[in-house]
Structures are given as structure tokens and as C-alpha cells.
Amino acid sequence: MATTSVFDYVIVGGGSAGLVVAARLTELQDISVCVLEAGGDITHTPEASVPGYGKALWFNKETDWGFLSVPQKHSEGAVLPMFRFTGLMQLNRATAREYDALERIGNIGWNSAEIHKYMVKSQTLAYTPEELAENHFEADKKDFGSGPILDTPSPYKLTYRDEWYKALEECGVPYNANAIGGETMGSWMSPIAVHPKTRTRISSASAYYEPNKHRKNLTIITGAHVTRIQLNTTSGKPVAEGVYYETNGKKHVVSARKEVILSAGSIQTPQILELSGIGQKKILDEYGIPIVVELPGVGENYQVGFFVAMSYELKPGHESHHPLATSPEETISTITNICAFVPLPKLEDHQALLDLARKSNFSKIPPSVLNIQQEWFKDETMPQIELVTIPHFLPTAYQPEPDPEKRYLCVCGLLLHPFARGSIHINSSDAFKHPDIDLSAFDNEVDWQTFVQGAKLTRKVHLKTRAFNDVVAKEIAPGSDGDTQEGLEKYLKVQLVGGYHPVGTAAMMKKEEGGVVDNKLKVYGVDRLRVVDASILPFQLGTDPQTTIYAFAEKAADLIKEDI
């Protein structure tokens, strides 16, 4: 096994977090960084750069890992696909209380003020005054700096946008003119990560890597499938000294003088840790992997978002992004999202949900986190359900193909703060074999009934409000099946989608509560090994995580620099 090279830092994963850390560390000219990325560089391909073409990457074997869950009880025993693709580009932020909760559970230095500082560092408000007015967005300049991530509006105004806001207001959900200011409850049009001039997708690759790729101290190796971390155990506490990986069947090792940084994501970070001998002894013993550090929290505490989409046919006069049927330029250059974040009291029969939560046993959740999550559940302004409009046709068994003369709307209802806790663990010592992914989807009645109530709200907004009466011609899915509790629940189980926004499998918590990393992101029991990706989040945030991950990576880079 030949040594490829030696660098100061080796980063495993060139995603949202890894490339940010790489760019910031290589600002120091005497520091060398190597990023190992399993995929190829698709930054400049139309599918990756043009937002409207992003769906071409979904379930593409070249760009999607194709992860599947183990069979899930509430999806009729079916497996659920784990999404790892180009998303909807929403640049939202969580509430200040959610970020403050990180410090409440013991992570000193992780609070809303600190994270806000790094959001300012990473983002630039790229709206014109006219665009702010048109989008009813009362942005505060103190919430933005001059970072490489540009917050822009969609250039495409949905014909029913204002009616949708009014429909939500009829259901008790107000319009929120500045949802990134610390309180997210309400409806609004999300800023998106699209360049205002080129209309191309903004990502860590385009914003952090591309401007800096010619730095002599930055090396990216693509097609590099990491198999394990090189750990030296000869003198007491294990030390991370490098990374083993394979390219095209050839084995390599790259050495790190200072640190190894895992940024492989919530699925593969715990897999790599376990393959390296860090995790639960009983699991590692089963697959013949020598235990180096027993760390029970690895792969546990797994949380993902769940959603189900409902679809509607629009009345004449309303447009949607029907594939190239209206304006091709607008369709391929943007994805338009109007969204709403809904707290529990806005749901039907919310008191029954509160009663159910009080009686439920959530033994998998650490006490410090459970106390906070129970607070949020009954909070009158903390969102529990998100509604996202996607102005496209949704193929279903109810109607597999669109009528080219008609326009459609798809609405996704998302569960934001699930009480369910799943797990990700290896099922082989083979690094190329996917791990067992157990979402524990709706393993408690609280999550399930909250999700059902979210679906009922979706139907109410689109079928039973005065504001939307002149917009929707009919509901395609679930249609009349949704008129009974039994029919609606069956539809939700069959159509359930899970696996987006995965977090928690290398949680930043106290070790005794199942934590894997400390507040410096250092793995417990190992020297020179950190984790910087969404797996460190101990709980699910009630928002799209993109901006949060950028901010976390910016902070991580500063933490690493402090130790140089």
C-alpha cells in the first residue's frame, strides 16, 4: 500500500462543510490541505449548475449513493430512499432558541449570537431594493456580511403567491416579513442559493472551492472512497494519523501531520468511524473489527425529516413550472419556493397531541435534549410542520401523467422536530457496502399524529379557504381518499418519503448522554480527529440546514486554526 502524500490536514468529504473548511484553512499559505471526495467534479455540468435541471441527478448512480433504509413500520413495511442530491436551495435559518439550545445542553460557545456571527461571515444579501419590496422581505443588513453564499430571490413570481399567504392567514398562520431574523413562524418566500447574474446554483463547490482551487496548498482527490482512518495506538490515547482510501480498485493512504477531519455526512461519518474501530464494541465484534475506542453514541441518535406530497390542479389563469411549457428561461433557471412554518397550536386537535406527548415515553432521547424538545412542542411559536409549495406536476397512481393543457401545484408537508431516534450501523467490514439505516420512522404515536394533522392543514389551506377558492380546480392526490381518517392515513403511509436533512449520528453532546464529539468538534477518546458535518447536530432543526452547515463549517475552521 503506497503512501500518496502527506498534508497538514486531511478532510474526508467535499460537501457543504468539507469545502468550506478546506477553503478557510488554506487561507494560511503555510498550511496544506487534502480533500478526499468519493464523487467526481460535476460543478460545471448543467445538471449541477442549472437549478431547474437538478432533478436529473436524483437517483442517478453517478451522483447519488442510492442509500435505502431497512423496512419501516409506518410505510407499510417498505424501505425508504435516503436522499443525497441537489436540493431546493432554500437559505433559511432556524430560530434563535434552537441555536441557543446547543449551549443549553452543554456545548459552550454554540449559541445564536455565535452562529449568527458565522452566518454573517458566510452570506451576502443579493436583493435589490426593488426585489426586497416585491418579495415583502424586510431583511436587516446586520444579518448579512459579504460572504461567498449569495441570498437571492426567485425571479419568477407565482401567480397565486399572495393568495397562498392569505390562505395561511385564514388558518391562523401569519405572514413573516423577516423569517431569518430569529423567529421563523409564518409564511414567506425563501431566499435561494442562485447567482443573481448567471442564474446558476450556488454551493460550497462554486462559492468556496472554485475561487480557490488554484491554491498550491489545496489538493482535491476525487473518486476516493475512504475505507477507514489510520489510528496509531502505540502510546496510550489513539491518534489519527491519516486516511486509507481506494480509487479504481487501488489502495492508498494519505497522512495528516496535524488532523483528520471527517465531513462525510450523517450516514457515512458514523460508518467510517465504526470501520476504524470507534463505536459500540458489540457491533464491531460482530464484524471482526478490533475496538480502538468504545464510543456508544456513534451511529445512534439518527434523525431525519419526513414528508408527503399532495397535488392539485390549478384553475385557468394560474401558471406553474410545468416542464418548459411557459417560459423555458424561468423554468430552468430557478426553483421557486413559498413556504410556511407552523407551530402546534395552529393544527387541528393540538390539545390531544399535547396530552399524547405527556403520556409518551421517549427513552431514546437524552434527558437534556428531551426537556428542550418538549418545551418546543408546546411552544406557540416554535414550528413543528413546514409546508413547501413546488410548482410542478407530481406523478402518482392517482394521475401518472400531466395534461399538457393544465397547470399543477405540489405541496409537501414536512415534520420538523421528530421525537423518533433511529440509527446507522455497519453490517459488514466492507467499506463499500451500505450500512443499515434505520429511521425508526414514526416509532411513536406523537410524531405520526402530528404528521397527520399537518396533512389535514395542507388540505384545509388549499381546499377550504376563501383565498384559494379561485386557485385550485381540484385535488388530485389524495383526492376523496383523504376525506376519511383511515383513507388519509393510508395515503400518507404509502406516499411517505424520508431521509432528507439527516443529523445526529456523531452528536455534539456530553459523552455520557451519547455524544461523539465535544464543543471543539473533537471525537471523544481520539487525538487529532474532528467531525464537521450535519452529524454533529444533536437534534433536528426546524429549518432547511444549508445555511446552518455553512456557518458551522466557518466556526469549525476557526476552532481548528486556534490549535495551529
Image (cartoon, rainbow, N blue to C red):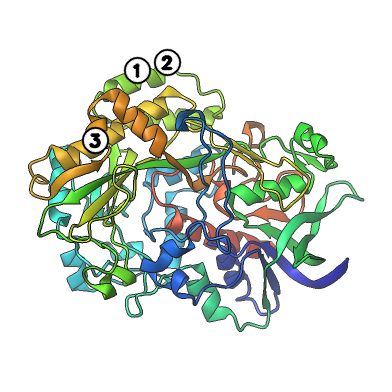
Label 2 SS: helix
Q: Which residue is drawn at 38% across and 18% down?
A: 356
Q: How far apart are marks 3 and 2 (CA)?
A: 24 Å
Q: Give how far across and how far down residue 380 sits, in percent.
A: 27, 33
Q: Can residue 172 be seen in this view?
A: no
**Front in this rendered view, residue 105 or 91:** 91
Q: Which residue is drawn at 72% across and 53% down?
A: 432
Q: Do the residues labelled 2 and 1 touch (CB within 8 Å)?
A: yes
**Front in this rendered view, residue 54 or 283:** 54
Q: Give how far across and how far down residue 493 sits, in percent.
A: 40, 32
**Image quadrant occupied by the N terminus:** bottom right
Q: How far apart are marks 3 and 1 (CA)?
A: 20 Å
**Front in this rendered view, residue 477 or 303:** 477
* Amino acid type, mark 1: Asp
Q: Please name the residue that numbered disc 3 is placed on.
A: 457
Quarter of image, res 169: top left
Q: Can residue 323 be seen in this view?
A: yes
Label 1 SS: helix
Q: How crowded is mark 3: few (under 14 residues within 10 Å), some or many (20 or more)?
A: many
Judge left or right: residue 107 versus residue 449. Answer: right
Q: Distance between the residues labelled 2 and 1?
A: 7 Å
Q: How crowded is mark 1: few (under 14 residues within 10 Å), some or many (20 or more)?
A: few
Q: Give how far across and how far down residue 333 sits, in percent.
A: 32, 72
Mark found first going from the N terminus, 3 or 1:
1
Q: Please name the residue that numbered disc 2 is placed on.
A: 359
Q: Give how far across and how far down residue 49 sits, in percent.
A: 44, 72
User: Which residue, as the protein is rendered here, is positioned at the far top?
Assistant: 359
* Amino acid type, mark 3: Leu
